[in-house]
């Protein structure tokens, strides 16, 4: 048995070295792909061939014969797509891909129980996301009417079945075959065709369009992300072993004072996160180097390279709420759960998301301890926030105190509930919780069950606006004015970008009208869009701004 464990550890270490080697090679090849094999230099077919050949080689280099699982799942799903009616193809693809992933998870759990190994199920999980999201996008594009689609579904819809080369290129492209991040097919297609990199256009004082940035560069972002990945990689190697998650169930730690125990718990979970910070940040750098991940420009005209980013490290480490932490962790998987499950579930969408998330991750008992704990923790945190937050808004000192309290409590409860996800096994999880008499579980459950939801008070003018728009304010005090926002989306985008529409040559927008737009539009949730648009107008006027003035004036009257 000891020989078997030693061999498995050796094999896992070799796989880790292979993974890092391939990702560093992918980073270098991404620069070649971006600048030598760009869409302007070579055809799209050549780019597809290069991406899939290199991707398959990297998958084989890391996982050897296990790469056959990638081909089995992707090929069967492609046959289903080709042979099924668009009305049901997404269901069949979802069922088969999840069943195949489930069998592989069971295999991994049986042969490597209680240990974390970097095996083929990781890339297979990403491939499952790809094939299910593609089948849903094909269902939307080939079967459903545009009027029944949400704006996001309409944007992601795929209206032609990919050719075999396009399909396998999407499944195996070298940028994301080993560690993701998940890229949706519409974004992948735009990247391959070279249409995803948009220029930055400003308007001069004469109303002429001036190209400020012809093609956004990612070199600075890639260098920053690669450096960040290297830092967390070294931290994982040299500091991580000092704070092992299994140390939390060591007799010496269990016998220590509570403050020492919780301090060690915090450090061990922080170290457990470093492997994700390393892998996902490096994968993001590889994608950006290849030109994938461009997400437009910010208000200062700087390129944004966060379209497929999987996390925001600073917002995770300094989160002051559970929601803030969840929103910035494994972002693409959360989006996949929403698009594939939550938006399409016929009933109980939240429950379906929990079930899908748990099944997709695997079958270690620790996963389910964490998910069930999170199901209790979320409503408890929401109720506590409703009852406490308004009491700390009187002064800046009170608000600062509230942030400190919420920061501490968020990470304390997170560490407590996430530890089983790292431990994986049943026995150490029970040992840890039993040593604390399940006290925190009991306290959180009591808050979630006994503490009532607090009815939110709402400003009278906001209620009036909501009634005028024919909608009901939600529990968080937001006005659900979707009808107005959707109806004016095109024109608002013109204002936001500061370009577009026909030029109005005569006159300028006066200060009075600018103030009218920015002040009044704030009431309708349009303030940021219109204000940002004003920054790009200079002295030139556009129909987008003219529309905004008339829209707000109508609302005011």
Image (cartoon, grey):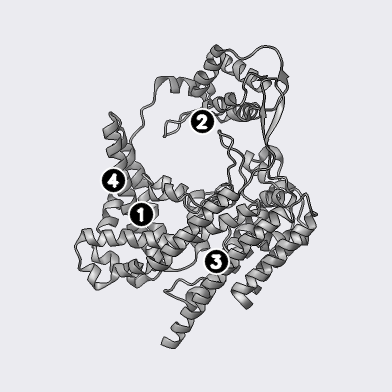
Asked if disc 3 and disc 4 are in contact, CB closer than 8 Å, the reply is no
Q: Nearer the viewer, mark 3 or mark 4?
A: 3
- Asked whether, in this view, residue 314 is left or right of residue 454, the answer is right
Image quarter of residue 300: top right
Residue annotated with mark 3: 122
Q: Secondary structure at mark 4?
A: helix
Q: Nearer the viewer, mark 4 or mark 2?
A: 2
Q: Secondary structure at mark 2?
A: loop
Instruction: Work out whether mark 2 precedes mark 1 in sequence or the reverse, and give the earlier one.
Output: 1
Instruction: Work out whether mark 2 precedes mark 3 in sequence or the reverse, and give the earlier one.
Output: 3
Residue annotated with mark 1: 414
Q: Residue at x 69, y 58 (%)?
A: 32
Q: How far apart, in angstroms, are the residues tagged by discs 2 and 3?
A: 39 Å
Image quarter of residue 511: top right
Q: Nearer the viewer, mark 2 or mark 3?
A: 3
Residue annotated with mark 2: 480
Q: How far apart, in angstroms, are the residues tagged by discs 4 and 2?
A: 29 Å
* Position above or below: 543 against 215: above
* Quadrant for the C terminus in the image: top right
Residue annotated with mark 4: 450
Instruction: Work out whether mark 1 precedes mark 4 in sequence or the reverse, and give the earlier one.
Output: 1
Q: Residue at x 36, y 60 (%)?
A: 269
Instruction: Work out whether mark 3 precedes mark 4 in sequence or the reverse, and give the earlier one.
Output: 3
Residue 284 image point, x, y percent: 56, 55
Instruction: Work out whether mark 3 precedes mark 1 in sequence or the reverse, and give the earlier one.
Output: 3
Residue 111 image point, x, y percent: 49, 79
């Amino acid at each position: 048995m000891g020989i078997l464990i030693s061999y498995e550890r050796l094999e896992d270490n070799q796989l880790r070295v292979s993974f890092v080697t391939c990702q560093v090679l992918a980073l270098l090849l991404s620069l070649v792909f971006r600048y030598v094999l760009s869409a302007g230099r070579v055809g799209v077919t050549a780019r597809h061939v290069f991406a899939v050949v290199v991707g398959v080689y990297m998958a084989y280099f890391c996982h050897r014969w296990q790469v056959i699982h990638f081909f089995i799942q992707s090929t069967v799903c492609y046959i289903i797509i080709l042979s099924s009616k668009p009305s049901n193809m997404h269901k069949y693809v979802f069922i088969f891909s999840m069943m195949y992933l489930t069998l592989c998870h069971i295999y991994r759990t049986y042969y490597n129980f209680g240990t974390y190994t970097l095996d083929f199920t990781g890339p297979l999980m990403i491939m499952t996301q790809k094939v299910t999201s593609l089948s849903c996008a094909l269902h939307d594009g080939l079967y459903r009417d545009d009027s029944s689609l949400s704006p996001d579904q309409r944007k992601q819809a795929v209206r032609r079945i990919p050719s075999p080369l396009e399909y396998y290129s999407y499944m195996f492209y070298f940028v994301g075959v080993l560690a993701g991040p998940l890229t949706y097919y519409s974004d992948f297609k735009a990247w391959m065709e070279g249409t995803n990199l948009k220029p930055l256009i400003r308007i001069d004082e004469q109303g002429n369009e001036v190209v400020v940035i012809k093609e956004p560069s990612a070199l600075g972002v890639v260098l920053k992300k690669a450096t960040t990945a290297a830092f967390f990689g070294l931290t994982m190697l040299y500091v991580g072993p000092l704070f092992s998650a299994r140390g939390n169930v060591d007799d010496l730690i269990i016998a220590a004072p509570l403050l020492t125990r919780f301090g060690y718990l915090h450090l061990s979970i922080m170290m457990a996160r470093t492997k994700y910070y390393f892998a996902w940040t490096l994968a993001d750098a590889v994608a950006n180097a290849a030109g994938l991940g461009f997400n437009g420009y910010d208000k200062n005209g700087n390129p944004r390279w966060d379209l497929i980013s999987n996390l925001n490290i600073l917002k995770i480490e300094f989160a002051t709420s559970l929601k803030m932490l969840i929103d910035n962790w494994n972002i693409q998987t959360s989006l996949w759960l929403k698009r594939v499950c939550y938006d399409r579930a016929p009933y109980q969408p939240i429950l379906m998301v929990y079930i899908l998330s748990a099944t997709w991750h695997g079958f270690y008992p620790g996963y389910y301890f964490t998910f069930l704990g999170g199901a209790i923790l979320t409503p408890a945190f929401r109720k506590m926030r409703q009852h406490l937050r308004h009491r700390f808004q009187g002064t800046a000192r009170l608000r600062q105190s509230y942030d400190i309290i919420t920061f501490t409590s968020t990470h304390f409860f997170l560490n407590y509930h996430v530890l089983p996800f790292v431990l994986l096994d049943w026995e150490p999880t029970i040992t840890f919780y039993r040593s604390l008499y399940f006290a925190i579980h009991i306290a959180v459950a009591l808050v979630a069950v006994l503490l009532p939801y607090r009815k939110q008070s709402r400003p009278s003018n906001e209620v009036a606006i909501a009634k005028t728009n024919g909608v009901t304010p939600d529990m968080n005090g937001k006005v659900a004015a979707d009808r107005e926002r959707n109806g004016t989306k095109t024109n608002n985008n013109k204002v936001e970008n500061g370009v577009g529409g026909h030029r109005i040559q005569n006159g300028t927008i006066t200060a009075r009208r600018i103030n009218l737009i920015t002040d009044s539009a704030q009431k309708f949730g349009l303030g940021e869009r219109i204000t940002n648009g004003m920054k790009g107008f200079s002295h030139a006027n556009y129909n987008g701004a003219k529309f905004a003035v008339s829209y707000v004036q109508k609302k005011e009257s």
